[in-house]
Amino acid sequence: MAEDFERLSEIRAEDVADLCLGSVFLATGGGGDPYVNKLLTEAALRTHGPVAMVSPGSLADGAWVLPLGEVGAPTVSLEQLPVGDEPLTALTRYEAATGRTVSHLIPFEVGGANSVLPLVAAAARGLPVVDGDGMGRALPEAQMMTFAIAGVAPTPAVAVDYLGNGVTFDTASVDDYERQVRHLAMAMGGMIFTAEHGMSGAQARDCVVPDTLSFAVALGRLLRSRRGEARALLTELQALFAPSIYGVVRHLYTGKVVDIDRRISGGFDVGEATVAPVQGVGEPLTVAIRNEYLLARSGGRVLASVPDLIIVVDSETCAPINSERLGYGQRVTVIGVGCPPHYRTDAALRVVAPRCFGFDHDYVPLEDLAAG
């Protein structure tokens, strides 16, 4: 029996690098490059001290939980660097706009950059962070969060940009909010910071994907300490994931990137990567991208698809590669991981199944595809 991972009671500055590394793995190519936000978060925790972390199940009914994160095309974040106070600004403006006093913060996805952004504001305010998120991975649109699927309203919400400009949202539905926030992100330079989907403790207990920050730290520690050839690390990854909400881990493909078509369209990084065998013998693998890696196909067969996780790692080090950093000639290994049970319900699959992204097939769980 694989040992369970340690649930953390606080996040310290020395945990941030592992949190970012594990989060990039779980974010399936999305969630933003973590480097700059890692530095900002480490500095905030050194200045203000560790941030307390609480389990979703311990939240009181009357708590008010606020998700914070970035919205936009991750490629933009490589060029347009944050000032560092955007998460705190978003929190402050949300409280002013709503009259609410926020008691807890939470990431809306476990992404490389988005996992740590709430910690910056939490450290400055002395607020705890909930050990969880609204996806258990990264996904490109607001209606795909477990918060929205459970009926939590996305607005009132606040968005700020790198220049300190702010916009408040009040929409009739999450679909309206997604359209408006995406257009705003494009108009404000391609990337904005949002405070959205505020919810009570009772609501959060029902819809948060639990323990993902603790799990990301444990995963990051494994990847750092056992840095090496990806396929050799597979057994240890399977042992870590087996007792978690993810479960199954599968090797899908190893090769080199021979083509990459990536562009910013509609506020997303979209495109497709082609990976071919290093020796040139065998069918290539194609990976569809919409911020995240969404579909892996080879020889006319689907090997894995959203909402399951598709992770691209460096074959020599097993370091996960964000989609905006995937490039021609890289030697990569593609890994599939099962999605949390939150995304296997009928309500969730109505907004996260492959057909929601324009792919012409239904969702088949990774374990069934592998068995087939």
Image (cartoon, helix red, strand yellow):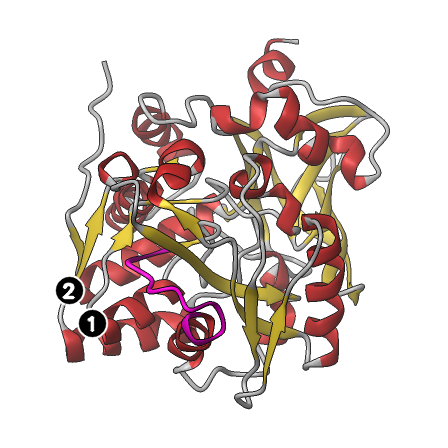
- Marks 1 and 2: in contact by CB < 8 Å? yes
Mark toward the start of the polypeptide (2 vs 1): 1
Q: Residue at x 24, y 78 (%)?
A: 43
Q: Amino acid at mark 1?
A: Leu
Task: List the residue tagged with mark 2.
Answer: 50
Residue 342 position in % (x across, y down): 50, 28
Tell me the SS state at disc 2: loop
How many marks the image carries: the answer is 2
Q: Is residue 352 above or below residue 168?
A: above
Q: Amino acid at mark 2?
A: Pro
Q: Residue at x 37, y 53 (%)?
A: 65
Mark 2 Cα within 10 Å, few/some/many (few <14, many 20+)? many
Residue 361 position in % (x across, y down): 81, 24
Asked where in the image residue 113 lies, by quadrant, the reply is bottom left
Residue 115 position in % (x across, y down): 40, 57
Q: Nearer the viewer, residue 314 or 55?
A: 55
Instruction: Specify the quadrant that holds the N terminus.
Output: top left
Residues drawn in magenta: 95-106
Residue 268 position in % (x across, y down): 72, 61
Task: List the residue tagged with mark 1.
Answer: 45
Let me know if residue 264 appears in the view.
yes
